[in-house]
Image (cartoon, grey):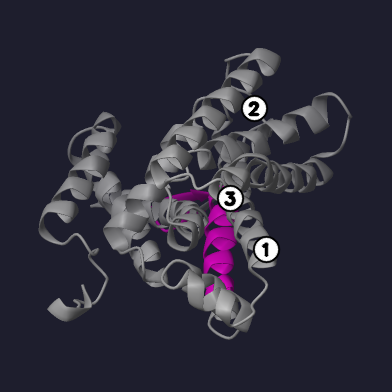
Amino acid sequence: MILLSQLLLNALVNAAIFSLLAVGFGLIYRSMRFFYIAYGAVYVIASYAVVAAMQISGFPLYLSIGAGVFLGVLAGVLMDRTVYLPLERSGATPGVLLIASLGLYILAVNAVALIFGNEVKILSRGIEPSFSLGPLVITRMQVIQFLVGWILVTGFWLIIRKNTLMKGIWAMGETPNLVTALGLPCGLMRLLVFALSSVFAGVASLVTALDVGIDPHVGMHALLIGAVAVIVGGVDVYWGWIGGASLLALLQGMAVWQFSSRWNDLITFGILIITLLFRPQGLFSPRKRREER
């Protein structure tokens, strides 16, 4: 039971990180309605920007973290302005945007690997101090991950439920013509979506990299966690994204308890396939009447 309790505690921490990934991916998928593969590239760029700031510029860690988040946001916005937006203006379909996003991901990951190498980069040196909760143990970095993750996703929800601009962003995925007709600043809203998505990706990347390090190829795993959490929880429900992320973290913890962490990918895609087959609107989405579908 001690092992199970420890794994549940770890799952609660992982749920905070998965929720950050889900919110970042969900913002693009919900409002732009295309599968944003380059989200994984933003995840990688943010942490490697910290590596560059520390090793090349000699910045202290806290300044490097700020630089990493900023450069991650800059990368996400530039991808939209230089690739996605011109393609959409030329009438590109979501399939074309998907392929373009995959191309950007491959380009960015290989550029990072070429510059920094394929080995794991460690951002934080030394042994993390830990705290005892009875028989359970939690590290300082896990406490930071838990607090940062849950504070950000909860705080963001409090903002979007009261902010008119964010309500307009939410409506972009359903009635984009209505948003334009109402005279809302669509260009600003689009910029804000990509910037906010990159912030969540960057923060998730950094709190993970500070714990276990980073390599150029982890972005795809982060992307898939965020995407599966959104689809399983329900694309149109913010707390569904969080619920999907928490469910994934819990099931992966149970897989480690009963089997091995090698089964995590099976768990992730197993729950995705089951959801798509039996509840395609998402586990936490309300059922729609037939005439609303």
Residue 8 in sight here: no
- The extreme bottom residue here reads 162
Sort mark 3 into few (<14), some (14-19) or many (20+) by Cα contacts within 10 Å: few
Q: Which mark is residue 206?
A: none
Which residue is the site of mark 1?
187
**Would residue 29 be found to the left or right of residue 157 on screen?**
left
When the figure is inspected, residue 119 is found, relative to residue 223, above or below; the finding is above
Q: Amino acid at mark 2?
A: Ile
Q: Which residue is mark 2?
A: 122
Span of residues in magenta: 132-157
**Where on the picture, by quarter, is residue 189?**
bottom right
Tell me the distance, in whole angstroms, between the alpha carbons under discs 3 and 1.
12 Å
Q: Secondary structure at mark 3?
A: helix
Q: What secondary structure is found at the residue carrying circle 2?
A: loop
Residue at the spot of label 3: 89
Task: Confirm whether residue 32 shows in the render.
Answer: yes
Residue drawn at the location 41% of the way across and 46% of the way down: 94
Q: In which quadrant is the C terminus drawn?
A: bottom left
